[in-house]
Image (cartoon, rainbow, N blue to C red):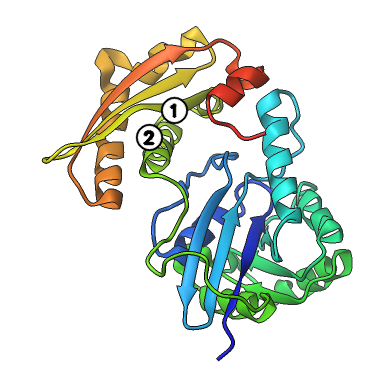
Amino acid sequence: MTTRFGHVALIGRPNVGKSTLLNQIVEAPLAIVTHKPQTTRHRIMGIHTDERGQAVFVDTPGLHKRRDHALNRRLNRIAADTSRGVDVLVVVIDANRQTEEDDLALAQVKHHQGPSLLVLNKIDLLDDRSALLTLTETLMAKADFKAVVYASALKNDGISDLLDEVFAALPEGEPAYPEDQFTDRSERFLAAEMVREQLMLQLHQEIPYGLTVVIERFERTDRRVEIDALIVVAEERHKGMVIGRQGQVLKRVGTRARVAISELIGAPVHLTLHVRTRKGWIDDDSLLDELGYAR
């Protein structure tokens, strides 16, 4: 049997379900998921291995038109650059709602040298599935797709169809990673993301975009994993909101993040959270470098 190997980029505007799709593919809570736009801020690699070979999926930040600060501009560059350096491009569109930002993802198909696939996600929310035919025809007219997959990432529907199309499009090659490895990201990185996920879920709409999380200590002992995490906010007034009255918000974030981290790494976790203001970090390229955001 021919073995296939290659890299696959998942691109699309914010909130179309790319991270949920990745998590279903690797069968692990690898990429954090919230209802807020721009939850994904980094390239996150998820590895799927089966008898056909190995597909290395790369989740990317949502392509968007906001360019009002350095972080937004950097996130767009990450997504665009990633889409040009892979074997297969997967464009994810929300079947229920399209915006002009979808065109940013569709435009990447023209720059991609290899095959591209279209995923129409969230089809479970459609009242009239006959509309899928018209939508498919419209999108196929805008970009050259090898195939179309209809999916509901949330319900794990269409994932096997997507994998079939991906492996059919990948070049021949031998796996580059062990069969049981599902990402190249460290436990330290995943811990920071899980803390940030809870902050995104617990805080008001405008606050999460001005914060990030840095792991200052990640140490395994005989009994548990001890983690010290620093929450960095862009404005002093947000510091009190993150902590909450009598520390209740921070306590809730810490409790839920600790459980999630423990389940992922398979060990008891002691998590300590601190909050610090780094004014204007989202618009400072040197601070973005220091805080781990790729250029």
Which residue is most to the bottom?
1
Quarter holding the N terminus is bottom right
Q: Is residue 222 above or below residue 85?
A: above
- Residue flagged by tag 1: what amino acid is it? Val
Q: Are marks 2 and 1 in contact (CB under 8 Å)?
A: yes
The quadrant in which the C terminus is found is: top right
CA gap, disc 2 to disc 1? 7 Å
Image x and y of residue 122, in percent: 58, 63
The dot on residue 251 is none
Residue 170, position as x, y percentages in the image = 66, 75
**Tag 2: amino acid:** Val
In terms of depth relative to the viewer, which is nearer, 55 or 39?
55
Nearer the observer, 42 or 159: 42
Q: In the drawing, what numbered circle is on residue 213?
A: 1
Coordinates of residue 38 in the picture (x, y in percent): 59, 39
Q: Is residue 4 above or below residue 99?
A: below
